[in-house]
Image (tube, rainbow, N blue to C red):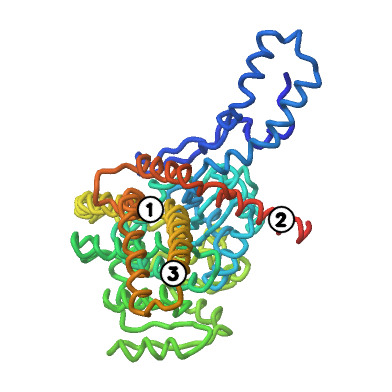
Amino acid sequence: MAVPSGFATAFPTKMESIRVFHNPRKINTMAPDTGFAFIPRRCDGFASKALVRGDEVDSKAMKFAALEMLKTSAADRYTKDRSSIVVIGLNVHTAPVEVREKLSIPEAQWPQAISDLCALNHIDEAAVLSTCNRMEIYVVALSQHRGVKEVTDWMSKVSGVPVSELCQHRFLLYNEDATHHLFEVSAGLDSVVLGEGQILGQVKQVVKSGQGVPGFGRKISGLFKHAITVGKRVRTVTNISTGSVSVSSAAVDLALMKLPESSYANVRVLVVGAGKMGKLVIKHLVAKGCTEMVVVNRTEDKVVAICQNIKDVQITYKPLSEMFACAAEADVVFTSTASETPLFLKEQVQTFPPVNDQIRGKRLFVDISVPRNVESCVSDLETACVFNVDDLKEVVEANKEDRLRKSMEAQGIIKVEVRQFEAWKDSLETVPTIKKLRAYAERIRASEVDKCLSKMGNDITKEKKSAIYDLSVSIVNKLLHGPMQHLRCDGSDNRSLNEILENMHALNRIFGLDTDMSELKQKIQAKMEQTRRQGP
């Protein structure tokens, strides 16, 4: 029998390709909500009969069975599924900078991206972490398979990168693996520069940008807030960031590696951009002995603020309009701006005068921006040499051994923190049942108290009414204490999540609390109805 067309989305033509990178623990298979598992039991008997006595079953009955499957499959699945935390991303380990820069989302656009993602049918919450080394989207998906597909399609739409190309470079992590990954990121264990501290500030910025945005919900905000705590704890306990280099300092070291040592005293330096990254570049240039540089920025105030904190160094401010003139006079150009288009094109750079032979006749461009500020084909010129964030790996190899030892210690901390977060997240699954059970008990308590007071007449004193009320509340609280304890999962006892959920389902059945439509199904239907109203 042919599979009805309505099942098309549930049966992928091939397994999802999952990119596996440096952590061998992060191996994922197809989302678990695909395949035949959702076929309702009530159809099993009919299907079995059809197999045994196929010649006796008329076509109308077969069509009816298929129709029933179509009507009930999705609904039944959503009543059984639990929402999942999923990360869909590309980073320096899985994708080159030329792909990452197309997907980069400026910080100012993160709130809008959250709103757009949560408008998708199967996405309930979302967050965006977009830096020079990564573009990662964290979501609470009401259906793993559908949610991943919708987010991937959205990424392709906003970036112009075909879905097939995204799938070659993206990685997918679910639930505990997604949590573990973000904690590693926040701790600096997933960075090119192991233990670097800038990423923790970027994770904090995700929380700051998400405040007040409806789609930055309880689970995702809780995940990122816990990640900040983990990042701080790892750095405090292991000292993994002690003496570590950031992307900016690695860029300075790379430039020094490429310059002859004899030219250090005379090299002419230009820094384009005085934001967070540019400020760190200036700081590390000074630490390496640079006493004179030109800084080009859109406004002067940031450069003035930097100069106030750095003494005995000549920092000359120039406006953006003089950028090309300054670059023509520089031997080394560092770029770190938020421009979405290249600032230096090949046809512009080839007009620059040659640099001093003392630095081997090539002007160095060290571009740590994503999207890149220097067009990649500039490196085709004989008079220029271009390096980007992907070229920094050779710089950080020197002190990697000590940080790898510290990272092993950090993994033990992360393992404990993941368990605590997962316990908190899992406990949220029982919140609706806890609320329903309390409301159910309160309705009975209030009704019985009213009946009791009406039988006692109007001459009862306020003190007696208060005593009866307090007694009823106390009885209800004591009766509910046991069931409530068996619905809570805080990681402090040995109860498994399955046991907690079994208790929840048992209470739902005993007290008739599950007569309402499931929360997941309600959210799905509400989103689909909203999409229909908005039209194509």
- Badge 2 marks a residue whose secondary structure is helix
Q: Residue at x 76, y 61 (%)?
A: 534
**Closer-to-camera residue (469/350):** 469
Query: Which residue corresponds to the image point at 35% horizontal and 66% vertical from the top-left?
Result: 200
- Residue beneath disc 1: 427
Q: Earlier in the sequence, mark 2 or mark 1?
A: 1
Task: Categorize mark 2 by other alpha carbons within 10 Å: few (<14), some (14-19), many (20+).
Answer: few
Name the foreground residue: 291 vs 59.
59
Can you say which quadrant of the picture contains the N terminus?
top right
Cα separation between marks 3 and 1? 38 Å
Q: Mark 3 to mark 2: distance in Å?
A: 47 Å
Expressed as whole percent of the image width and height from the top left, the position of residue 174 reads 45, 45
Up the image or down, 257 lies above or below 521; here it is below
Left or right? Give the position of 431 relative to 421.
right
Name the amino acid, label 1. Answer: Ser
Residue corresponding to mark 3? 453
Q: Name the mark nearer the viewer: 3 or 2.
A: 3
Q: Is residue 179 left or right of residue 157?
A: left
Q: Is residue 132 visible?
A: no
Residue 287, x across and y down, in percent: 26, 76
Element on which disc 3 rests: helix
| Residue 191 to residue 279: above or below | above
How far separated are the C-alphas under marks 2 and 1?
30 Å
- Using the image, determine if residue 490 lies above or below residue 70: below
* Disc 1, SS: helix
Q: Which quarter of the rendered picture does the C terminus lie within?
A: bottom right
Q: Position of residue 305 (x, y in %)?
A: 38, 89
Asked whether the viewer can see residue 416, the reply is: yes
Q: Which residue is mark 2?
A: 529
Q: Are marks 2 and 1 in contact (CB under 8 Å)?
A: no
